[in-house]
């Protein structure tokens, strides 16, 4: 999974096509897992062991993408059509550390995980950019799910990355952030689950409509968020970690102007409570509307912030570590 630290939303078409987008994100120790077990019975079995769900198809060149396993089916269909040109026989099971609608890029991370398992099994000649691009096409083109481009690339590459988007072109710039700066950021950044979820596609569609309609307030807010990503890169590389809270607060104010459904009264109250308890800034993770929020809490203020949120709203703070690795596959 990933935390979008700056520039969120500028990777979404048509904004990124017209103006170019820029995002700074970092991957954390929450994962999507996929296991493929080759079989000889001609069946394709999609499994979710944690939910006790299973769907089975026989001798399938293409499977219907309705139902619970839409992402699994989308990847299967693309792999068969583009690479194997014949039905596969397998059991494929998956698990995700975060709930759907978490705002941590869970859906795209799962697609990358599933695709990575096929690449490992079938020895497909795909590099990191190929995998991320293919995962994006499966979600956005094949399945028609609204969203941006950053999540697939974050899950594939891992680490702290400054990403640039222009039309179909994506450039991932890995950042060499000193470990002491990463440790300080991790120490001060509180990840809080609001105990709600969101449907990111609805928010993103509203954002896209605002750009297509030429709404200046929405477009200008995206310009400011793109500026935020450049500034965030600078302060991280220079170790000016104390400025991150103010940068997050700057971004939050503009993110809310991208689409009306980004925030709501509950999220605003959570944000205000964290700020009153000592946070210097924060934001919703992902498109908005629910899921995870995170707050920069300098010094020892994270304890007061956690307690204030727990007492007033419940939910939970999530322990995590920043990670340097992206997609990892192996065969047993």
Image: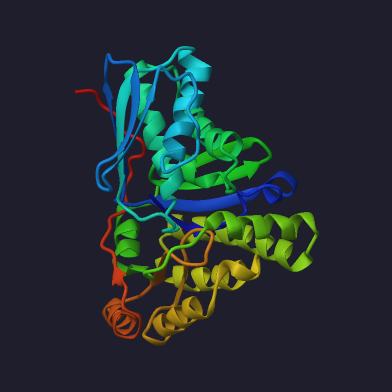
Q: Which of 302 and 11 is in front in this view?
A: 11
Image height check: is 174 above or below 225?
above
Q: Where residue 215 sits in the image (x, y, percent)?
A: 78, 64
Image point 56% across, 38% down: which residue? Answer: 143
Q: In which quarter of the image is the C terminus?
A: top left
Q: In this view, does 149 lie to the left or right of 257?
A: left
* Residue 157 makes an appearance in the image: no
The x, y position of residue 290, in whole percent, is 46, 67
Q: Which residue is drawn at 62% across and 53% down?
A: 10
The x and y percentages for residue 103 are: 45, 58
What is the quadrant of residue 193 in the picture?
bottom left
Position in image of residue 187 (x %, y %):
29, 66
Describe residue 114's horizontal placement relative to residue 9 as left or right: left
In this rendered view, identify the residue nearer to me: 35 or 241.
35
Camera-nearest residue between 193 and 144: 144
Q: Is residue 113 above or below residue 300?
A: above
Regarding residue 102, the answer to whether it shows in the image is yes
Farthest residue to the right: give it: 214
Q: In this view, does 323 lie to the left or right of 261?
A: left
């Amino acid at each position: 999974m990933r935390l979008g630290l700056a520039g969120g939303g500028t990777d979404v078409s048509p904004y990124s096509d017209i103006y170019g987008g820029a995002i700074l994100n970092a991957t954390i120790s929450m994962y999507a897992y996929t296991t493929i077990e080759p079989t000889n019975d001609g069946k394709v079995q999609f499994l979710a062991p944690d939910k006790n769900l299973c769907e089975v198809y026989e001798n399938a060149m293409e499977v219907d993408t309705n139902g619970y396993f839409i992402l699994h089916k989308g990847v299967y269909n693309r792999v068969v059509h583009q690479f194997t040109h014949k039905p596969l026989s397998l059991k494929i099971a998956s698990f995700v550390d975060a709930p759907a609608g978490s705002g941590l890029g869970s859906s795209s991370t799962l697609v990358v995980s599933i695709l990575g398992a096929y690449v490992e099994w079938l020895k497909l000649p795909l590099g990191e950019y190929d995998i991320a691009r293919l995962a994006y096409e499966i979600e956005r083109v094949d399945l028609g799910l609204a969203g941006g481009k950053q999540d697939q690339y974050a899950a594939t590459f891992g680490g702290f990355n400054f990403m640039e988007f222009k039309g179909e072109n994506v450039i991932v710039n890995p950042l060499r952030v000193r470990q002491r700066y990463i440790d300080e950021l991790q120490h001060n950044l509180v990840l809080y689950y609001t105990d709600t979820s969101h449907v990111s596609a609805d928010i993103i569609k509203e954002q896209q409509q605002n750009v297509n309609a030429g709404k200046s307030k929405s477009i200008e807010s995206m310009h400011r968020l793109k500026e935020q990503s450049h500034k965030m890169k600078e302060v991280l590389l220079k170790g000016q970690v104390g400025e991150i809270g103010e940068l997050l607060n700057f971004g939050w104010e503009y993110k809310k102007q991208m689409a009306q459904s980004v925030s709501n009264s509950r999220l605003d109250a959570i944000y205000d409570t964290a700020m009153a308890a000592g946070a210097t800034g924060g934001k919703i993770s992902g498109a908005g509307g629910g899921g995870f929020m995170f707050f920069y809490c300098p010094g020892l203020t994270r304890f007061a912030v956690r307690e204030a949120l727990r007492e007033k709203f419940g939910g939970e703070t999530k322990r995590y570590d920043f990670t340097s690795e992206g997609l990892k596959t192996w065969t047993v």
